[in-house]
Image (spheres, coloured by chain):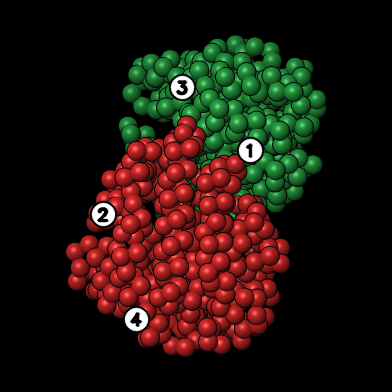
Chain colours: A red, B green
């Protein structure tokens, strides 16, 4: 890893000349140039699996803004797709999956074609690395097993998790077989991304916040910690960030037990509380995406409140959730300026 | 307040012979006798505003199960209705409100007919009190200003809060006028309920968990604390429980600053963490409603995990969110037996 990548420095708890910043879903619909590329393909998965287009949209925000990291353009549902589940993205209604609801259906999934199916992601990662400025780090990523499993079982997003949680409560052994398969697949996929050129990894557990404390331990924290162990066993120097969205005070448990270098904080986490976690892990976050949409004084005040409390420790500025499609791009430019100009 | 009401004893930090239990939305669609009454009226608001029917559905779960509290059957959106906003409940899609989106529209709302419009709730409360067994406490309730405001602005539920939060970020002064109006209305309405016979109050802030730390302070914690102050100024002995759902570690801030007697914990809060709050407030919660749907070992284990950690301090057993329509009533009976038989 070249010196001068501020995101990597922060995640390794080294000094950096300025507070680094990147934004979840920074390659996305708020950019007109993204929407233009999106019209060139019929399906969202085609965009993920066509390296020259994935490279293009990954680089678009880097060309516009002085962001300190890029994140490879892809989706967490490429893993179930590569395991053999039918996954599609319907216009305007999000992902639709042919649901998996029994141990028998889990056994029909297979790791055999995982690496081959996901090879276009590797190709895109390698190409992005060649194009990125030397100060910009490249993130690879995957979904955490619980979040991916919940999409696989529910058959899509936006649900109440009654099916996934119901299965986990009623038949924990067969649900664990699904989680174990996802631990294997996700570890393998993240290693594949590192070997292609990803310099940092993020594991998104977007739906960790619907689990009770005991369920969080079993279905989210332990499986994610196992993935981190497997990645670190082969690549101990690659920083890993985990984003267990919505888990509240259990962020402290993750800080102690997950083995990751960084934790990404959701919007609700109070920076004044989270500062105590920086003795264990670097933190990332957590501006409200709607404060970025609003811009102006509200954005400046919210961002300053975060920077005041967290920028003295290991810290990467980010949003608390993905950037929204209605975000004016000039607000992103103003935010980068504020963060980079912040005096610790 | 008669002795022997275990919920009131727990909220006052007094000893009680067993751990008390009630369930959010315990009068609801999971009961066939509720569904039967629901067919007798055309609209949900008609059910709320017809005292003999509201009394009937309030008492239904008390007849079936040895619950330690009843909660008056109503809805948090009776307040915007009583302020003059058009509110309806569409079958299968939740509440629909003619949205309020400017300071001018806030000024068209009025407190003038609030008490009169909400008089049927008082009538129902008084009637329920006459019917309840002497050991069963009666809760009155209202929504917290932020949650009610978000419905009023968005025009319904299930949104991304872009309009309510956008207004709050861009024009905090005029948004504060809406919050202030709701502080006045909610305080008045809760006092009206106490004067009719409510013995305990709960304030539901179901959408507190979408706010950033600074926004939570301004739009949720401070307005709720003001309501608690106004209620306590007139009725210092009436216990008040606050349910700021989804706020994570900020429950600690509420425990210190909200002035309430009890905090209701959402499903995600780890009992092992929350136990530290019992030096400030009584706790209520927080079984996953889907564990109650599952029943059996999963429910017993989840409930025991909560009881082990929280039942030594001031504690009322409850769910972490409302009971789900698909809940088998016999699981509620089994849960009451487990909780009442628990040896501290």
Q: Mark 4 near mark 2, Cβ–Cβ under 8 Å?
A: no
- Could you say whether the residue bearing mark 4 is in a helix, strand or loop? helix
Work out whether residue B35 or residue A222 is closer to the camera in this orientation and state it. Answer: A222
**At x 39% / y 59%, what residue is drawn?**
A76
| Figure label count | 4
Same chain? Circles 4 and 2: yes
**Which is in the foreground here, disc 3 or disc 4?**
4
User: Which labelled disc corresponds to residue B328?
Assistant: 3
Residue lying farthest front? A112
Q: Is residue A66 left or right of residue B1?
A: left
Q: Do circles 2 and 1 both sit on a common chain?
A: no
Instruction: Look at mark 1 in the image and give the residue it sits on.
Output: B264
SS at badge 3: loop
| First in sequence: mark 4 vs mark 2 | 2
Dot 4 falls on which chain?
A
Q: Is residue A161 visible?
A: yes
Asked whether residue A296 appears in the rendered view, the answer is no
Q: Which residue is mark 4?
A: A127
Instruction: State how far apart marks 4 and 2 are (Cα).
Output: 26 Å
The residue labelled by disc 2 is A88
Closer to viewer: mark 4 or mark 2: 4
Residue at mark 4 to residue at mark 1: CA–CA distance: 51 Å
């Amino acid at each position: 890893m070249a010196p001068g990548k501020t995101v990597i420095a922060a995640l390794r708890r080294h000094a950096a000349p300025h507070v680094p910043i990147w934004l979840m879903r920074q390659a996305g619909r708020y950019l007109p140039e993204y929407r233009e590329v999106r019209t060139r393909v019929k399906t969202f998965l085609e965009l993920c699996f066509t390296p020259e287009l994935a490279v293009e949209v990954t680089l678009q925000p880097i060309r516009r803004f002085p962001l300190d990291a890029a994140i490879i353009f892809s989706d967490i549902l490429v893993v179930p797709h590569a395991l053999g589940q039918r996954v599609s993205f319907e216009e305007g209604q999000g992902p639709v999956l042919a649901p998996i609801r029994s141990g028998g259906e889990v056994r029909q999934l297979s790791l055999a074609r995982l690496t081959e199916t996901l090879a276009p992601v590797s190709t895109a990662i390698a190409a992005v690395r060649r194009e990125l400025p030397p100060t910009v780090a490249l993130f690879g990523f995957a979904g955490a097993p619980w979040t991916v499993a919940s999409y696989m079982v529910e058959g899509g997003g936006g649900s109440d998790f009654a099916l996934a949680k119901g299965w986990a409560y009623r038949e924990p052994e067969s649900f664990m077989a699904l989680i174990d398969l996802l631990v294997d697949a996700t570890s393998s996929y993240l290693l594949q991304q590192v070997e292609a050129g990803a310099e940092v990894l993020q594991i998104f557990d977007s739906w960790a916040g619907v689990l009770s404390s005991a369920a969080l331990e079993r279905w989210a924290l332990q499986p994610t910690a196992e993935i981190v162990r497997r990645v670190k066993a082969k690549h101990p120097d690659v920083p890993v960030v985990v984003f267990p969205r919505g888990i509240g005070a259990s962020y402290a448990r993750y800080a102690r037990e997950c083995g990751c270098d960084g934790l990404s904080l959701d919007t609700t986490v109070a920076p004044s509380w989270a500062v105590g976690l920086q003795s264990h892990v670097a933190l990332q976050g957590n501006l409200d995406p709607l404060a970025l949409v609003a811009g102006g004084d509200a954005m400046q005040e919210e961002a300053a409140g975060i920077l005041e409390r967290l920028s003295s420790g290991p810290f990467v500025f980010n949003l608390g959730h993905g950037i929204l499609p209605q975000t004016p791009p000039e607000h992103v430019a103003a935010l980068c300026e504020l963060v980079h100009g912040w005096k610790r």
